[in-house]
Image (cartoon, helix red, strand yellow):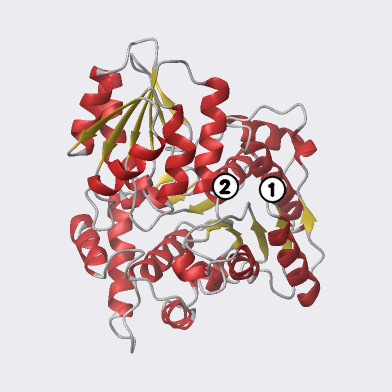
Amino acid sequence: MDFEQSVEYLLSLGHETLAIKLGLRNTELLFAALDHPERAFVSVQIAGTNGKGSTAVMLDSICRAAGIKTGLYTSPHLVSMTERIKVSGVEITTGDFAACATVVREVSEQLEALPTFFEQMTAIALLAFRNAHVELAILETGLGGRLDSTTAANARIVAITSIGFDHEEYLGHTIESIAAEKAAIIRPGVRAVIARQPEPAALDVLLKRCKAVGVAPILAESNAIDGLTLGLRGRHQVDNAAVAIGLAELLNDEGFEISRSAIVDGLKTAEHAGRLELIAHRPPFLIDGAHNPAGAQTLRAYLDEFAPRPLTLVFGAMRDKQLEQMGEILFPVADVLVLTTIDNPRSASMDILQTIASRFAKGRVLPAESSRDALRTAIANTSTEGLICVAGSLYLLGEVRPRILSLGES
């Protein structure tokens, strides 16, 4: 298969979330059939509701600053599937992606049950890492932890970032049940780092899990980054950076040489597209992947402290998210609220969004039929001294980010 055929094939397996089948057996059989690519390198697995992607990119940046050859696996992507797989900070080429996808497809079709989209994507990433001879793989958990495909890699070192409400249909409707699903990556024999938890009940679950399996966790402390400069925006990144530092220290114990200067340089130069990402334009754009109440609260705190006015918010989201709560948090801060639908079967309808806006919006509310129209509407209704913020879904960011970047270049 070439790259386009690979993408078409993977998409034919069903939507990443809608077609998900939680469980490790299929992934374990797939890894075995590929001669266990996960055994070719040391792995770090990072789970959590918010911050796991940012923590992963910060750790990757730290390790690359230390001269370690890294593989980074994150999800979802914004524009291209190649974004999910990076070697030494560089996206996998379309040719290498296609080559790995072809092998994984051939093996998958010989198994009794065809692996899902995410199971095959995870195998593609680990196969690519083995082919590239990486020393360290940094794996962002897709959903949950206990039954997520990345858990089949049997990482020696794991981390849990901030836990909140998201994907309740799969993980449960209490903070305890969600925390338990993520805590399951803490297994006998691993080393673990736990982030500061906004929910005491979540921390209690995590600590009980550690005690049950005989793991003495490192509790990440925000003072670990005193005096350091972070490349990622937002005060919440302090907690994520503290986790990344804790992981780097554990990797030192595993024989990787990571100096203090590598930590300093790595945190300063880390980049993460779509997470409080500021894109120069007149007016400028701030794009953020906040898609649950905790993420929305983090974005709101940043907007309240740093955003110039007038502020236009472009918002679109998936209908299975906590839209009322996100709307209550974000909509009141906008002078202009532009609502849009997303080219995705899970997109919230305009009727749903407008109903929520009627309750919480304090400024003008403008509907837009598509994300393209939403950008035009936002630019037309925002002065050059203001700010346009785009939020609500990473899928929305995937649609608008290339268009915004092209605006910046014009």
Q: Can residue 289 be seen from the camera position used here?
A: no
**176 or 289: nearer the viewer:** 176
Q: Secondary structure at mark 2?
A: loop
Nearer to us in this view, 343 or 158: 343
Task: State the residue in front, 238 or 354.
Answer: 354
Q: Which mark is residue 112?
A: none
Does residue 163 show up?
yes
Dot 1 crowding, Cα within 10 Å, few <14, some 14–19, many 20+: many
Q: Residue furthest bottom?
A: 112
Instruction: Tell me if 81 is positioned left or right of 43 in this view.
Output: left
Q: Quadrant of residue 377?
A: top left
What's the residue at 47%, 83% (across, down)? 25
The mark nearer the N terminus, 1 or 2, is: 2
> Which numbered tag is attached to residue 243?
1
- The residue indicated by pointer 2 is 51
Residue 409 locus on image (x, y percent): 28, 19
Give the residue drawn at x 41%, y 26%.
334
Screen quadrant of the N terminus: bottom left
Pinpoint residue 96: horizontal percent, then vertical percent. 33, 56
Residue 370 lies, with reference to residue 46, above or below; the image says above
Residue type pointed to by label 1: Val
Q: Position of residue 220 (x, y in %)?
A: 75, 48
Query: Which amino acid type is marked by label 2?
Result: Gly
